[in-house]
Amino acid sequence: SSHMVRLSLRSSRPHGDRAPSRGTQPSGGPPASAAPMDSSSQSPPAGGDPSEDGAAAELPRLTVTQVEQMKVEARVADIYRVLFDAAPNAKSVMLELWRDQHVEYLTKGLRHLAPSFHVLDANRPWLCYWMVHGLAVLDETLDDDLENDIVDFLSRCQDKHGGYGGGPGQLPHLATSYAAVNTLVTIGSERALSSIKR
């Protein structure tokens, strides 16, 4: 059976101060179908008295993304529970790192990402960083061609006035600059380091 973790939605009021209204979810889990949060999904407060809005206003619905995040968190919690309850001799088998599969996945991702990654178009320096850093943690070296491809790609993300954007031609900002510079420092070659316009 799947156990769903219930998360609160940034409320300054204790849960007891808010009476559930029609259309809200029970506290046992996410809604059957979540709709994006916007002003049209919330009912205006009943009456004109501002003190009534806490009890009468409908709670905001969870977005699809929030529901998916809750599912992931619940699954991770289930995995931790299984691991915590396992016998000591079983834990070593359960925690076995499939190094070769990780290296293959990360290296393949640096060469080509599946179409499902298109939603991360503005985060490509982060993808480079996560994959390059993962390989470095596994003490795996990049071949020269792949290393050069990464440096060339990040150079195309670099703005002529400084900083790195999320992809070629995108506006630079601190977060993607941080990821790009960390990727190049992790690679550590003279070519990688000299590509940074300081």
Image (tube, helix red, strand yellow):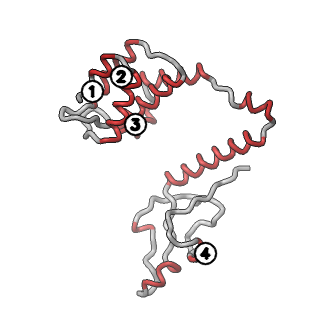
Task: Describe the element under mark 1 as helix, strand or loop.
Answer: loop
Alpha carbon distance from label 4 to label 2? 53 Å
Alpha carbon distance from label 3 to label 1? 26 Å
**Which residue is rendered at x = 37% and y = 13% of the image?**
145
Q: Position of residue 142 (x, y in %)?
A: 44, 16
Q: Earlier in the sequence, mark 1 or mark 2?
A: 2
Task: Describe the element under mark 4 as helix, strand or loop.
Answer: helix
Alpha carbon distance from label 1 to label 2? 13 Å
Q: Residues within 10 Å of mark 1 (few under 14, many from 20)?
A: some
| Pointer 3 residue | 118
| Pointer 4 residue | 16
| Pointer 2 residue | 150
Single out the mark in the foreground, 1 or 2. 1
Single out the mark in the foreground, 3 or 1. 1
| Left or right: 15 in relation to 64 | right
The answer to whether the residue labelled 3 contacts the one labelled 4, judged by CB atoms less than 8 Å apart, is no
